[in-house]
Image (cartoon, helix red, strand yellow):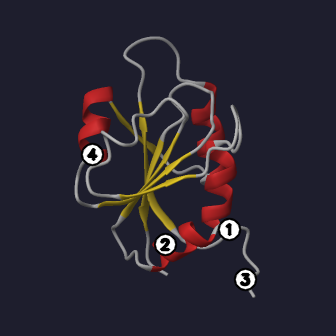
Amino acid sequence: MNKGKCINPCILAAVSRLGHGDRILIADGNYPLASKTGEAEKIWVSLSPGLPTVTDVLDALQSVINIEEAAVMQPAEGPDPEIFAEFNTMLDGMQLRRLGRSEFYDECSNPSLRLAIATGEQRTFANLLITVGCA
């Protein structure tokens, strides 16, 4: 019986096929998952507006994988979205790699993106691209 925080069978099956350096996108509800994630396996866990959040999914994933790197979509102007600080805290102070919108979409269309998870997250710029670390 699984004792981790992640109990979604589709996510667990997909994660079991990943290795060091593969990437996972945890996308907010606005992200064009079907058109901007290339050949990655796509899983929609969105239930209703706001549920689950990107941070809910990140919390569950952290119970089953190590994260080596994380990237976010940086707004063209204005202050950092508040969720960036939440990501930083959840990732134990890991420096977030900041990518412009087009660059982020390009990274998420790269073959190294193996899993894309759509959430019901409503906060803007709440997309997180993580790289799987070693066990």
- Closer to the chain start, of discs 4 and 2, is 2
Q: CA distance from mark 1 to mark 2?
A: 10 Å
Residue located beneath label 1 in the image: 6
Q: Nearer the viewer, mark 4 or mark 2?
A: 2
Q: How many numbered circles does the render carry?
A: 4
Three-letter amino acid code at the position of disc 3: Asn
Can you say whether 84 is above or below 96 in the image? above
Q: Which residue is mark 3?
A: 2
Q: Amino acid at mark 4?
A: Glu
Which numbered dot is residue 107? 4
Labelled disc at residue 119: none
Query: Disc 1 vs disc 3: Cβ atoms closer than 8 Å?
Result: yes
> Where in the figure is residue 57, as x and y percent of width and height?
63, 53
| Image point (27%, 61%), residue name | 112
Q: Nearer the viewer, mark 3 or mark 4?
A: 3
Sequence-first tag of 4 and 1: 1
Above or below: residue 40 compared with residue 22: above
Q: Residue at x 31, y 40 (%)?
A: 36
